[in-house]
Amino acid sequence: MKKTLTAAIAGVLLLGGLSVSALDKKSETLALLPAMKYESAAPNRIWVGTFQLVWNDLMDGIVKGPVEFKGKKSKLAEELNAQSFTKEMISENSYYTKYGETSPELRDTIEKAIKEKFDETSDVLNSVDWAPGPNKYTAYAMLKKDFKFLTAFDKLKMERFGKNKEKVQYFGINKKSDKILDKTVHVMFYNSSKDFAVVIYTQTDDVLYLYRTKDDKTFDKLYSDMFIKRAQYEGNSDFTEKDELKVPNIGLYKEQSFDELCNREIKGTNMMLDKALETVEFKMDNEGVKLKSEAIIATKMSAMLPEKNLKPRKFYFDDTFVIFLQEQGKDKPYFAMRVNDVAAINKTERKK
């Protein structure tokens, strides 16, 4: 639970220059990913389990099985169907989920619940058409974390991050810091000045993993690598009085629509996804971390208009037509007939 969530946060910290641009994947600077295994060319990436939670409800509560689209297979849908993140991986007081038939009443229920549980309002509810209709369902989730470090770290001077000339604010531990801060940090491994990881403890059950690496891999592989390196590390795991820590302040908001999942008919149903959206708001400074994320999936009717809206059709075989007879599973019919003059044909009938 804690490791999965904090791995996502760690992934954010690996990357610099958190500016938001257009959703063109080739030029995108900051990407919000729907799954830990999802590949992206964006230099800065975020993953939060919120979208997986709404997908789980879509599968289990609405579709009643894996979500598979007609036509070309979706690799993303297959990854989400694996349900690699579930409610059991995070404490109940950190999330809220709700799904049901789309209606103004469902929206009211969600708004009241997140206000009561988190004292929050939604950034995504306005994106959905809440008018009821056939095969219209909505699944919603909010994930929220707000925790303090065991002891607030020192504010350090502003410095550059990576090759960016613009200076950013840092926090951490230096030679002048109170030695009590050393106890809040645990060294996972230190292989070099460019390959190391630490754990920072908090006043809650949450822990923060920070992993320095330039490996360009998916989040699930980076997380696995971090623990493999920890298992192989034989050095000192204590943060000593000679050690120093420097972490940048981060503040961001990102909204992402997963359009590749929308407007494709779901097998076994007469519905498709009309909306697949996730947001994340993240802030980290010398005192702690604040995280708020929402996700919403809305479905709509995918079949043709109801029959009552169609013009009547008359299937009258009252002129030349053809008959075929064929056994199921066979490649060709065993009987074929072209009918041009019914009266003439009927005269050939054998009399009883």
Image (cartoon, grey):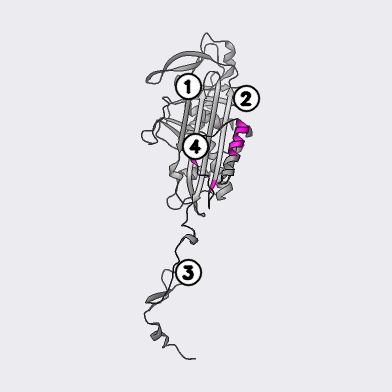
- Comparing 125 with 240, the one in front is 125
Q: Earlier in the sequence, mark 1 or mark 3?
A: 1
Mark 4 Cα shell of 10 Å, populated few (<14), some (14-19), many (≥20): many
**The residue positioned farthest toward the bottom in the image shown:** 352
The quarter of the rendered structure image containing the N terminus is top right
Q: Which mark is residue 191?
A: 1
In the rendered view, tell whether residue 240 sits above or below residue 223: above
Q: Earlier in the sequence, mark 4 or mark 1?
A: 1
* Image location of residue 129, percent across then percent down: 50, 44
SS type, badge 3: loop
- Comparing 176 with 119, the one in front is 119
Instruction: Tell me how far mark 2 sits from mark 1, CA to CA.
Output: 29 Å
Query: Of the residues tagged 2 and 4, which is closer to the observer?
Result: 4
SS type, badge 2: loop
Q: Earlier in the sequence, mark 2 or mark 4?
A: 2
Q: Is residue 338 magenta?
A: no
In the rendered view, tell whether residue 234 sits above or below residue 88: above
Q: Which mark is residue 204?
A: 2
Mark 3 Cα shell of 10 Å, populated few (<14), some (14-19), many (≥20): few
Q: Residue at x 51, y 11 (%)?
A: 174
* Image location of residue 342, percent across then percent down: 40, 82
Q: Which residue in the protein does label 3 denote?
A: 328
Mark 1 Cα shell of 10 Å, populated few (<14), some (14-19), many (≥20): few
What type is the residue that disc 2 sits on? Thr
Query: Of the residues tagged 1 and 3, which is closer to the observer?
Result: 3
Q: Which mark is residue 278?
A: 4
What type is the residue that disc 3 sits on? Gln
